[in-house]
């Protein structure tokens, strides 16, 4: 999987969480709100909401904050309407970017994405400019791959649940599936007593590319960092190796 496809930054994000807890809570609350808006406020019937709530709990977000985020999504609470939007663009060396945002103001968000990109060697393009370079996939990440005791049995169970690919990467493993099979795969992981670090639908590059130039690589890393730090940005996916 591409190095900056969200999963490779997961440990970095954990390390930064204590330094910017308010910002982390804000992003998690937005995800809860959008999930409740899209599928209703009952996590028993809304898988996306259940995953968003579990992620919020894992970050030790107070229960009252989570409930306010749910209420906001269902219309029972106050606040501006949030929506998920995806911006497409290019970074240094032509690396493709898929930037997933949760925002209450599309015009503000796209303007800020354009500013951040232009200051760091990138551009934001029109819808469809790079989406064709990615597949939209269900993704389940397990942050402690050592918890999987029987790799062959685990992979067989994942395939039977609907996994299309299983990628072992250092300390963690990522299970990919079609979007429609995400819930089944996540449920199978849970049934084996394994803890998921994240469950989502994201973007996997069809043909990853390498950035050979050191200066361009450094600039790309900086762009990805400033994008990831933005309050509206939920995840950034690239086609970089």
Image (cartoon, rainbow, N blue to C red):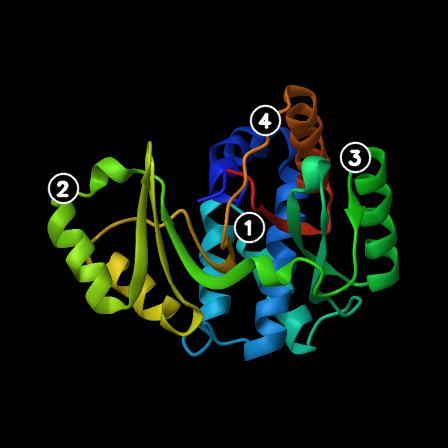
Q: How far apart are marks 1 and 4 (CA)?
A: 44 Å
The residue labelled by disc 2 is 149
Sooner in the amino-acid sequence: mark 2 or mark 3: 3
Q: Residues at badges 3 and 1 in contact (C-beta under 8 Å)?
A: no
Residue in front for this viewpoint, 31 or 122: 122
Where disc 1 sits, the SS reads loop
In percent of width and height, residue 23 lies at: 68, 42
The residue labelled by disc 1 is 62
In percent of width and height, residue 113 lies at: 80, 48
Sooner in the amino-acid sequence: mark 4 or mark 3: 3
Please tell me whether residue 141 is drawn above or below residue 180 in the rendered image. above
- Mark 2 or 1, closer to the camera: 2
Sooner in the amino-acid sequence: mark 3 or mark 1: 1
Sooner in the amino-acid sequence: mark 4 or mark 2: 2
The residue labelled by disc 4 is 212
Residue that extends furthest to the top in the rendered view of this protein? 214
Where disc 3 sits, the SS reads loop
Sooner in the amino-acid sequence: mark 2 or mark 1: 1
Q: Distance between the residues labelled 3 and 1?
A: 39 Å
Q: Residues at badges 4 and 2 in contact (C-beta under 8 Å)?
A: no
In percent of width and height, residue 202 lies at: 52, 58
The residue labelled by disc 3 is 121
Pointer 2 local density, CA inside 10 Å: few below 14, some 14–19, many at least 20: few
Q: Please report the residue visible at 23 percent of the width from the left and 60 percent of the height from the top.
A: 158
- Mark 2 or 3, closer to the camera: 3
- Mark 4 or 2, closer to the camera: 4
């Amino acid at each position: 999987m591409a190095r900056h496809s969200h999963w490779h930054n997961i440990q970095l994000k954990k390390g930064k969480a204590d330094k910017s807890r308010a910002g982390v809570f804000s992003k998690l609350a937005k995800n809860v709100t959008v999930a409740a808006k899209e599928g209703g406020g009952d996590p028993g019937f809304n898988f996306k909401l259940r995953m968003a709530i579990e992620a919020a709990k894992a970050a030790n977000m107070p229960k009252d904050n989570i409930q306010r985020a749910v209420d906001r999504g269902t219309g029972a609470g106050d606040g501006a309407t949030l929506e998920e939007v995806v911006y497409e663009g290019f970074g240094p060396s032509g690396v493709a970017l898929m930037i997933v945002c949760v925002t209450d103001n599309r015009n503000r968000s796209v303007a800020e994405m354009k500013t951040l990109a232009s200051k760091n060697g990138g551009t934001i393009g029109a819808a469809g400019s790079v989406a064709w370079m990615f597949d939209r996939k269900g993704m389940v990440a397990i942050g402690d791959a050592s918890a999987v005791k029987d790799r062959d049995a685990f992979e067989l169970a994942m395939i039977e649940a609907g996994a299309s690919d299983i990628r072992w990467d250092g300390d963690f493993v990522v299970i990919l599936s079609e979007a429609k099979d995400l819930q089944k795969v996540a449920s199978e992981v849970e049934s084996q007593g394994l803890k998921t670090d994240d469950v989502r639908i994201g973007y996997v590059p069809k043909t990853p590319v390498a950035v050979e130039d050191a200066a361009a690589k450094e600039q790309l890393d900086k762009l990805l960092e400033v994008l990831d730090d933005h309050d509206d940005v939920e995840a950034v996916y690239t086609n970089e190796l």
